[in-house]
Image (cartoon, rainbow, N blue to C red):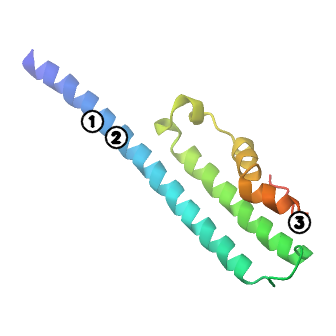
Amino acid sequence: MKRFIFAVFALGLGVQLASAAGAEQYVLAVQQINESYKKDTRDFFNTLNPMQQGFSSAQQAKFCGIVSQYADNLYQAAHENRAYLDRQYAGITKQDVIKQVMSSKEMQMLKKYNVQCDLR
């Protein structure tokens, strides 16, 4: 009986540790995605003329490509780790991620320069 209880306890602990490892993996993936996005946008903005008032069509396409890749990577990380996410996030869709990215403070600030990305 002691072995059975120990086995059930060990199995439960193993599941909790696997879940914690999965959640940690997700957090690390999101941190890496955020760092990459920050670097990409910083590099992009460093190429711009400080005096320009908006993006050219080529600049907008490049910037929107960076934002699109960011949203795709965030969704992929969530999708790969659904089993480890809280219930409220486990059902996240790509459209939910896009909506969150597009409503960010950075994207709202760029609206006044007529920068609009159509992410899908």
User: What's the mark number on residue 45?
Assistant: none
Where residue 47 sits, quadrant-wise, is: bottom right
Residue drawn at the location 69% of the way across and 62% of the way down: 69
Q: Position of residue 8 (x, y in %)?
A: 22, 23
Residue furthest front as drawn:
51
What's the mark number on residue 113? 3
Q: Is residue 66 left or right of residue 74?
A: right
Label 3 SS: loop
Residue topped by disc 1:
14
Residues at circles 1 and 2 in contact by the CB criterion of under 8 Å: yes
The local crowd at label 2, few if under 14, some if 14 to 19, many if 20 or more residues have their Cα within 10 Å, is few
Quadrant assignment, res 113: bottom right
Spot occupied by residue 2 in the image (x, y as percentages of width and height): 8, 18
The percent position of residue 54, horizontal first and vertical second, equals: 89, 73
Q: Disc 3 and disc 2: Cα gap in Å?
A: 46 Å
Could you tell which of marks 3 and 1 lies nearer the N-terminus? Answer: 1
Q: Amino acid at mark 1?
A: Gly
Image mark for residue 18? 2
- The amino acid on which the numbered mark 2 sits, given as a three-letter code, is Ala
Tell me the residue at 58%/45% (across/down). Answer: 79
